[in-house]
Structure formats: structure tokens, C-alpha cells
Image (spheres, grey):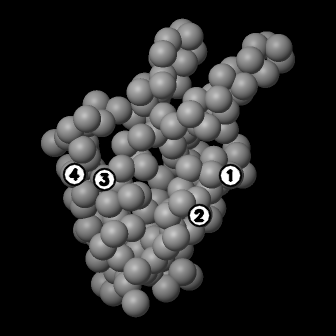
Amino acid sequence: MTIAVYPGSFDPVTLGHLDIIERASRVVDRLIVGVLNNSMKTPMFTVAERVELLKRVTGAIPNVEVRSFGGLLVDFAHETGASVIVRGLRAVTDFEYELQMSQTNRKIAPDVDTVFFTTNLEYAYLSSSIVKEVAMYEGNISEFVSPEVEQAIWEKIKSSEKKGSL
């Protein structure tokens, strides 16, 4: 049984992420979407909210599981029994960083391989940061995220405006 981990902050999960999840789920027996709390970024959604959103939008894919994790990705891979890490590549600029990370992970855990999926051209420009920025200026994000995620973003923005911060 091939188990893979697809890690990310998913803040928020985009249609580009969902494309990778759907495609990766077809080539492995079990895909674990690992939601990382990235201390380098200021999140819009809590880890628990991101996990819940991902569970909602991937619920129809039977071999996908969503979990949060902290620490080293390779440790999470070992904990879950995964022998494969799935990563998406949007552009050449992603490749350098992703190659360096995959080589580091391979050095730390030689039993875990990284597989890259090139992003569907329809989503090559798309990132969670872009979605958040467009939403902050009340732009149309319906072509970037699923309806469930779009609703959650608007609710989060409205709630933050009432509190005076995001």
C-alpha cells in the first residue's frame, strides 16, 4: 500500500491545491493532507479551521485523510507510514526551493521520496497569498477557491472587520 503526504499551510486551500490532491489521490492508495502551522506566515485561518475546510472540500475523495502536524515533515511521514511526499510546482521559481527541500528530506530520511506534480496551467499563477490579497480588497475570488472556502473567507474578513483586525 502506497501512502503519501501532501503538506502545506493551505491558508486557504485553493483550487490549485485541490487539483494536486485529486491527481495525487489517483496514483497512491492513501493520501494524507498534512496541514502545517507555518510560523513564517501570519495565517487567516487557524490550523483547526484549515483542517475542517480541507475535510469539507475533499470529503468526496475516499482515500484522502486530512491531519495537522508540526515539526519535521519527514517525521510526520514516518508517523503516518508514508513513503512519498507530494509537492506541487507552479513555476521554475518553485523548483529551486522544492528541490533543495526534497534533497534535505532525502538526506534525513532516505526511505521517503518526493514526487512533484506540475500545476494545471489554469492554476499556475494561483497562491493562497493572492487569494487573501484579492479578498482583502473585496475582489472576486470565486475562480480561485471552492464555494465553501469562499464563504469561509468572507465570514473571516467580516468577523475581523468587526474586531478591527485580520
**Residue toward you, 145 or 32:** 145
- Element carrying mark 3: strand
**Disc 1 and disc 3: Cα gap in Å?**
21 Å
**Disc 4 and disc 2: Cα gap in Å?**
22 Å
**Disc 1 and disc 4: Cα gap in Å?**
26 Å
Q: Which quadrant of the rendered structure holds the N terminus?
A: bottom left
Q: Position of residue 101 (x, y in %)?
A: 32, 60
* Callout 4 touching callout 3 (CB < 8 Å): yes
Q: Quadrant of residue 15?
A: top left
The residue wearing badge 3 is: 88
- Reply above or below: 21 against 83: above
Question: Mark 2 Cα within 10 Å, few/some/many (few <14, many 20+)?
Answer: many
Residue 105 visible? The answer is: no
**Disc 4 and disc 3: Cα gap in Å?**
6 Å
- Element carrying mark 4: strand
Residue type, label 2: Val
* Callout 3 touching callout 2 (CB < 8 Å): no
- Reply above or below: 64 against 8: below
Residue 66 is labelled as 2
Residue type, label 4: Thr
